Amino acid sequence: MFKHIRQSGWSLPGVITVLFLATIAVKVAYVVAPPFYDNYLVRQALRDLAERFPNKLVEMSKETANGELSKFYMLNGVRNPDIAKALVVERLKGRTIFSVNYEVRQNFMANLDFVVVFKNALDSSVPEDCCTAREK
């Protein structure tokens, strides 16, 4: 006479759990995405430096490289001012390595921070392999 009817759909605790997890995921993306986008622009700046000065990278001074990279950062809206100070130029036998290594500390909530470390390098002996350095 009566058929057994099963409940279909989500329960209230299930909906609250999904909303909580979605909120956390959006918050993580909101906090972590800008530093990764800035690092994408840093890599683009190093590639641009390699393309514009392919034969002058070996003898390029730190001041010239820093000026070119700073212009790129300003034009493309890099938000972190510490990136412009992170350039290190290392001269080795027959090649020059331009390194932009830095870390970003982003507050997530209360006293919980995300720390992201970025290591980028342009080797003048292989500018097409930007942005990782080869062995010294």
Image (cartoon, rainbow, N blue to C red):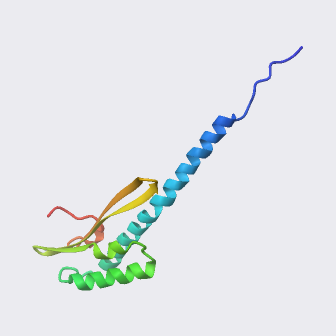
- Quadrant for residue 5, please give it: top right
Question: In the image, what residue occupies the spot 29% across and 75% down?
Answer: 85
Left or right of 93 on screen, residue 83: right
Q: Residue furthest front?
A: 110
- Quadrant for residue 100, please give it: bottom left
Question: In the image, what residue occupies the spot 28% across and 81% down?
Answer: 66
Q: Position of residue 19 (x, y in %)?
A: 62, 45
Left or right of 82 on screen, residue 108: right
- Tell me if residue 47 can be seen: no
Looking at the rendering, in which quadrant would you find the C terminus?
Answer: bottom left
In this view, the residue in front, 46 or 76, is 76
Q: In this view, does 114 lie above or below 83?
A: above
Q: Is residue 35 above or below residue 13?
A: below
Q: Position of residue 9 (x, y in %)?
A: 72, 34
The number of callouts visible is 0
Q: Which residue lies furthest to the right in this view?
A: 1
Q: Position of residue 79 (x, y in %)?
A: 43, 73
Question: In the image, what residue occupies the spot 20% across and 84% down?
Answer: 61
- Tell me if residue 38 can be seen: yes
Q: Position of residue 7 (x, y in %)?
A: 75, 28
Q: Is residue 22 above or below residue 90?
A: above
In this view, the residue in front, 42 or 44, is 42
- Quadrant for residue 131, please give it: bottom left
Looking at the rendering, in which quadrant would you find the N terminus?
Answer: top right
Q: Residue furthest top?
A: 1
